Amino acid sequence: MPESDSAADGQNSPGNPADDEPALPAGSSGHYSSLPSFSDVGGDLPALRLDLHVYAERARDRYALVNMHRVHEGDVLPEGPRVLAITREGVAMDYRGQEFMLHPQ
């Protein structure tokens, strides 16, 4: 009997190993909690709005809608900012080297 290819049926497919890592302990967001809020960062940041924010224990289950674009950790918005992390508090982002936290309104 031939061995089945588990990747072909969608099981054990390669991905980001961090997707299955446990979340940070409750109340902890690592260094992201010390990032300035989007509203406190000036400069040339594009207009951003956090429309929906879904935090889950597994990284692969986290997502957000920013300016109505569904994003996951590591994604880059059409406006340019990159999603660093989705935490319990909001979405940590980077735009041209400036890190900030986009909070729900």
Image (cartoon, rainbow, N blue to C red):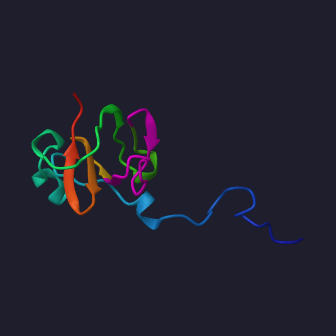
Rendered position, 5 above or below 55: below
Rendered position, 13 above or below 75: below
Q: Is residue 30 magenta?
A: no
| Residue closest to the far bottom | 2
The quarter in which the N terminus is drawn is bottom right
Q: Main secondary structure of the magenta part?
A: loop
How far across and how far down the image is residue 82, in percent? 35, 55
Instruction: Out of 13 and 49, give the one closest to the viewer.
Output: 49
Instruction: Out of 75 and 5, give the one closest to the viewer.
Output: 75
| Residue closest to the far right | 1
How far across and how far down the image is residue 83, in percent? 35, 52
How far across and how far down the image is residue 102, in percent? 23, 42
> Is 58 left, or right, of 85 in this rendering?
right
Q: Is residue 83 magenta?
A: yes
> Is 16 left, or right, of 31 in this rendering?
right
Instruction: Out of 85 and 9, give the one closest to the viewer.
Output: 85
Instruction: Out of 45 and 29, give the one closest to the viewer.
Output: 45
Rendered position, 66 above or below 92: above
Residue drawn at (76%, 67%), measured in percent from left and top?
5
How far across and how far down the image is residue 42, in percent? 13, 46
Residue drawn at (18%, 55%), measured in percent from left and top?
32
> Is 104 left, or right, of 15 in this rendering?
left
Residue drawn at (65%, 58%), measured in percent from left and top?
11
> Is 12 left, or right, of 92 in this rendering?
right
What's the magenta region?
66-84
Say how many tags the image has.
0
The quarter in which the C terminus is drawn is top left
Q: Quadrant of residue 89?
A: top left
